[in-house]
Amino acid sequence: MSDVTLKLPIYLDNAATTPIDPRVVEKMLPYLTEQFGNPASTTHVFGQTASRAVEEARDQVAALINADPREIVWTSGATESDNLAIKGAAYANQARGRHLVTLQTEHKAVLDTVQELERRGFTATYLAPEPNGLLDLDRFRAALRSDTIVSSVMLVNNEIGVIQDIAAIGAVCRERGIVFHVDAAQASGKVAIDLARLPVDLMSLTAHKTYGPKGIGALYVRREPHLRVEAQMHGGGHERGLRSGTLATHQIAGMGECFRIAREEMESEVPRMRRLRDKLLAGLADLPEVRVNGDMNQRIANNLHISLNLENCDFLLAALTDIAVSSTAACSSGSAMPSHVVQALGADAATAGNSVRITVGRFNTEHEIDYTIAYLRRKIEDCRAGRLRAE
């Protein structure tokens, strides 16, 4: 295969964000030009057209997760959804208790939100996962107290890609009357979600992990039985009073379209991504001291997270100019800190710092994976030989 057939660099950081699907762009464009109305201005055709687009997108988002469209609240993304869910549920239920339970491997949007609540008088338990990244259900049960009011466990880990048993965790919460929040930002379009069956009270979603635009997300808020959540943003009473602010019609239309595409195509797309991921793993597996982080069975199809026993891994990452991968979550990549997720699995800071996350996506090809295998093998060998120091 000739290198000139490929466009470099190759994008393999789809857990950080995904390229927007051209079909989504096409859906959004009219609402940036002639259909520019405010969806709250329903006294004229411009606002009415925008309002219909918002409700169509609400239907499409609800359809992917099998929810009632009335349970979908628009936000600016999963981070805002996490904040609204956790803070909103904690404040609404603080008369019953002030204890929260979560995992050490959660996204920073969850961990930082829980820590902020601790500064405001709540208490929290941060559970360590098993070495494979999964939550032990008995350990979870043991952490619950009579004053536990909220638990937050992500469906798919944003770094190592493991899939938690949300049904079992939610069942425990439902038995104890604990509000259960799930961050599903990494799961949409990759894992089947059925909220008509799952015992989940709140679920955070975003568009830009599913080939949609950045800056738009949603929060699922269960209607039956009624769930109390205190709004965190005020000023106009939009979204049934839960999230005030003029709705970004073009962004919302884009989220609806990318969720529609995901619903229609994930049955064929997920196996294709798994084949590419498995080919990548097979091409690197024989390298000495390459370790996969996280369970390989209970894991999304596109994620490969490896640790390398290298003294100079920073040189390797800096030298990977032909491929786009990450060493940690995008939310933490500017901190130069080892992955808190890998450390929670029991790894030391050096091992956690020598970790690479590779996530394939909808637009990656087999030729790109072939190139990546050869390229990574060559760069790792150069790194071990000390040749990258001179570059």
Image (cartoon, rainbow, N blue to C red):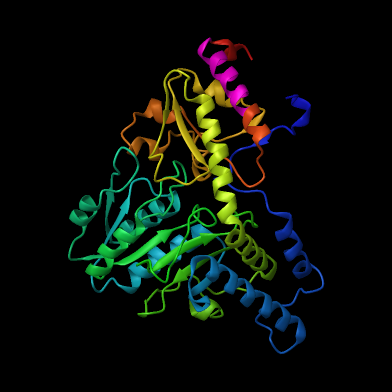
Q: Which residues are magenta?
A: 372-385
Q: Is residue 223 above or below residue 186?
A: below
Q: Position of residue 137 (x, y in %)?
A: 25, 52
Question: 388 left or right of 41?
Answer: left
Q: Is residue 168 above or below residue 108?
A: below
Secondary structure mostly seen in magenta is: helix
Question: 59 left or right of 109?
Answer: right
State the residue at coordinates (49%, 33%). Answer: 336
Q: Is residue 32 above or below residue 42?
A: above
Residue 38: say if magenta: no
Residue 375: say if magenta: yes
Question: 117 left or right of 262?
Answer: left
State the residue at coordinates (45%, 73%). Answer: 231
Q: Is residue 289 visible?
A: yes
State the residue at coordinates (43%, 33%). Answer: 338
Q: Is residue 74 visible?
A: no
